[in-house]
């Protein structure tokens, strides 16, 4: 078994996870009084947060033993194309973004909107990196990616 430091792909993959965790923790725990604010939509924020949490749970359940934090498929994993994966290729990322958007909307803090924007660009890069490995491991993934949008349902 190789260690993470012995595999450049694993180091790269874990760097995505670490930055993702930092952005998400900042989004959740930064105070409400940081920087300028716009109007707060508390109820809408709460709804987005809960839809994000539900999406995270459903996505995780769909992946089962294939679930991994790093954007490299597990060697014993299976490609999931059912459930939320029928609508988007990366429903876990979509759900985390929806959760984070809910926090930003509920807080009205521009700093949190900027953190969500950074999280989106991180997920975009992370998903592109992940898809390199998905196409290698699952030859049918290329055709699936042509049919199914990355994050937002019904946009293809």
Image (cartoon, rainbow, N blue to C red):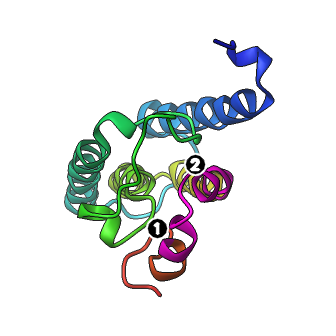
Q: Main secondary structure of the magenta part?
A: helix
- The magenta region covers 128-144
- Percent across and percent down for residue 68 are 45, 34
- Percent across and percent down for residue 102 are 34, 55
Vertical placement of 108 versus 143: above or below? above
Q: Which class describes the residues within 10 Å of circle 2: few (<14), some (14-19), or many (20+)?
A: many
Residue placed at 69% from the left, 29% from the top?
10
Q: Give the camera-side residue of 85 and 76.
A: 76
The Cα atoms of the two marked residues, 1 and 2, are separated by 18 Å
- Give the number of the disc on residue 92: none
Q: Give the camera-side residue of 119 and 29.
A: 119
Residue placed at 54% from the left, 80% from the top?
146
Q: Dot 2 corresponds to which residue?
A: 115
Q: Which class describes the residues within 10 Å of circle 1: few (<14), some (14-19), or many (20+)?
A: many
Residue placed at 58% from the left, 31% from the top?
22
In the picture as drawn, the residue positioned furthest to the bottom comes out as: 156
Residue placed at 67% from the left, 35% from the top?
13
Q: Nearer the viewer, mark 1 or mark 2?
A: 1
Q: Earlier in the sequence, mark 1 or mark 2?
A: 2
Is any part of residue 88 visible from this angle?
yes
Q: Is 22 covered by the magenta stretch?
A: no
User: Mark 1 falls on what kind of element?
Assistant: loop
Q: Dot 1 corresponds to which residue?
A: 151
Q: Is 129 covered by the magenta stretch?
A: yes
User: Mark 2 falls on what kind of element?
Assistant: helix
Q: Give the camera-side residue of 14 and 48.
A: 14
Is any part of residue 30 visible from this angle?
no
Vertical placement of 100 versus 142: above or below? above
- Percent across and percent down for residue 44 are 24, 63
């Amino acid at each position: 078994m190789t260690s993470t430091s012995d595999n450049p792909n694993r180091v790269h993959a874990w760097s995505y996870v670490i930055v993702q965790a930092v952005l998400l923790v900042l989004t959740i725990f930064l105070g409400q009084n940081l920087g300028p604010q716009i109007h707060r939509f508390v109820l809408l924020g709460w709804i987005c947060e809960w839809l994000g949490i539900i999406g995270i749970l459903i996505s995780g359940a769909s992946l089962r033993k294939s679930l991994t934090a790093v954007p490299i498929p597990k060697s014993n994993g299976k490609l999931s194309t059912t459930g939320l994966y029928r609508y988007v290729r990366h429903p876990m990322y979509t759900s985390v973004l929806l959760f984070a958007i809910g926090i930003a909307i509920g807080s009205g803090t521009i700093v949190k909107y900027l953190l969500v924007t950074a999280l989106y660009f991180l997920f975009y890069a992370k998903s592109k990196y992940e898809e390199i490995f998905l196409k290698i491991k699952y030859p049918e993934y290329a055709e699936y990616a042509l049919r199914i949008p990355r994050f937002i349902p019904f946009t293809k």
